[in-house]
């Protein structure tokens, strides 16, 4: 099964500095092998999967923990899901990223916005 996975970039500086007692950072995982990315319905499924992964990541991510903090955009409960989805999209294979962007456009999202709602949850 093909998966997209994004781990906290905090691991790299910690490895370089020799820090060994670091908590495991949250990750985002999105399966897409079962999707036909040439169909609007499956592109919409991909968008929903990325949205769910980003929201779950933000619920687990603690921006106040200096061991796992790696991107200032993730510190805001309001902006975290959108920023997390953008970070995940940056690691997608080109064809998946194109399908994801097409799915966003098909949903009528505003350019530059991920359209992710956290359900009014504030962090």
Image (cartoon, rainbow, N blue to C red):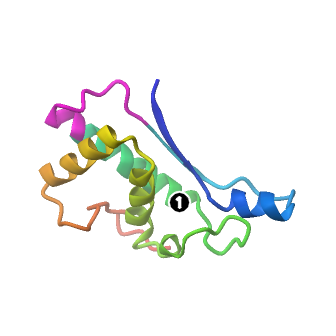
Q: Secondary structure at mark 1?
A: helix
Most common SS among magenta residues:
loop
- Residue 83 quadrant: bottom left
- Left/right of residue 1 with respect to residue 119 in the rendered view: right
Above or below for 43 versus 65: above
In terms of depth relative to the viewer, which is nearer, 122 or 29?
A: 29
Count of numbered tags: 1
In terms of depth relative to the viewer, which is nearer, 5 or 23?
A: 5
In terms of depth relative to the viewer, which is nearer, 57 or 121?
A: 57
In terms of depth relative to the viewer, which is nearer, 96 or 29?
A: 96
- Left/right of residue 106 with respect to residue 20 in the rendered view: left
Q: Which residue is located at x 45 percent, y 28 percent?
A: 2
Please provide percent x and percent y for residue 113: 26, 66
- Residue 18 quadrant: bottom right
Q: Which residue is located at x 45 percent, y 49 percent?
A: 91
Q: Which residues are magenta?
A: 31-43
Please provide percent x and percent y for residue 41: 17, 34
Please provide percent x and percent y for residue 118: 37, 63
Residue marked by disc 1: 59
Q: Which residue is located at x 29 percent, y 61 percent?
A: 114
Above or below for 24 versus 42: below
Q: Dot 1, how many residues are within 10 Å of its Cα: few (below 14), some (14-19), or many (20+)? A: some
Q: Which residue is located at x 61 percent, y 57 percent?
A: 8
- Residue 62 quadrant: bottom right
Please provide percent x and percent y for residue 11: 71, 57
Q: Is residue 76 shown in magenta? A: no
């Amino acid at each position: 099964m093909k998966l997209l996975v994004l781990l906290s970039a905090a691991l790299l500086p910690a490895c370089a500095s020799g820090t060994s007692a670091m908590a495991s950072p949250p990750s985002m995982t999105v399966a897409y092998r079962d999707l036909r990315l040439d169909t609007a319905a499956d592109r919409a499924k991909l968008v929903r999967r990325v949205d769910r992964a980003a929201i779950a990541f933000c619920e687990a991510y603690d921006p106040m923990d200096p061991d796992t903090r790696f991107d200032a955009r993730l510190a805001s409960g309001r902006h975290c899901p959108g920023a997390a989805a953008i970070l995940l999209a940056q690691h997608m294979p080109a064809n998946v990223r194109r399908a994801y962007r097409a799915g966003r456009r098909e949903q009528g999202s505003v350019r530059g916005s991920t359209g992710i709602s956290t359900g009014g949850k504030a962090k």
